[in-house]
Image (cartoon, rainbow, N blue to C red):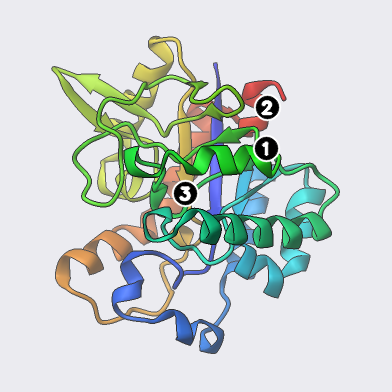
Amino acid sequence: MLNALSFDLEEWFCGHILEQGLGRNQWDKQELRSVRITRYLLKILKRHKTKATFFVLGWLAERAPELVAEIADAGHEIASHGYWHKSITYMNAYEFACDLEKSLEITSAITKQEIIGYRAPHFTVTKSTLWSLDIMAQYGIKYDSSVFPIGLHPDYGIANARLDIYKITPNITEVPLSTVNILGMRIPCGGGGYFRLYPYALTKTLLARCNKEGRPAVFYLHPWELDPHQPNLKLPYISKFRHYNNLHKTSHRLNKLLEDFRFTSIKGVLGL
């Protein structure tokens, strides 16, 4: 089965967790490490003859347009991750529309691809922000990949959301991050911190379970998760663990994943 592989293209300091240690007003003062590490990632994908979707943060595309062009030239799908990496939870409809529009203007100027996919920062398409889907459609978005069908996370998730790919509105297809139901509990296995936390054998078993149930796995990582030498900020213990845990193992695990499963872009899985 062809599964969906995606990367949220942002800098190491753009994540929700690091906001506790580094404010948005300090972003322009930080080292941009994503160009080098993403080029390394592109080599891994080329070696495994695998295409992926890159949800590009507009703020980064504005500063590294050549990187976005390289990704597109390598045959990967370019999609939107918004501009400011701000949770939809903290935006109203006007602010969200402005953020999405700005990100699309920047990325569309770099690539000739039609941008049809969106992923919300911190997966914040939740029950309280479903209004954002109609705005996405107004800007030509055809699929969203922001819903995590779990209820255990404090920042995101829709506990009773469907696990498979489905039409969430008449105009938007939802491509939820992979989760499996075991003994009445929903276990997330779609990548990111879960990929670094779980032993690889567990991830492999859970993703194989998705395929056995007849649905493609929807997997994601951030390029910074392949960068164990990134700056180490002072953070509360739990936050520090969530961000830095097992960064040194991600590259090896990703190579194993690409050997064990067949992947392509989300657009490819959807046949668009």
Q: Is residue 52 visible?
A: no
Residue at the extreme bottom: 29
Front-most of 97 and 31? Answer: 97
Residue 205 placement: quadrant? top left
Q: Is residue 224 visible?
A: yes
Give x and y (percent) for residue 23.
39, 81
Callouts 2 and 1 close, C-beta under 8 Å: yes
Screen quadrant of the N terminus:
top right
Q: Secondary structure at mark 2?
A: helix
Query: How far apart are labels 2 and 1 at the CA level?
Result: 9 Å
Screen quadrant of the C terminus:
top right
What count of labels does the image hold? 3
**Precedes in sequence: disc 2 or disc 3:** 3
**Precedes in sequence: disc 3 or disc 1:** 1
To which residue does mark 3 refer?
221
| Circle on res. 51 | 1
Callouts 3 and 1 close, C-beta under 8 Å: no
Q: Residues within 10 Å of mark 1 (few under 14, many from 20)?
A: many
To which residue does mark 2 refer?
268
Amino acid at the residue labelled 1: Lys
Residue at 31% x, 65% y is 244
Residue at 32% x, 31% y is 149
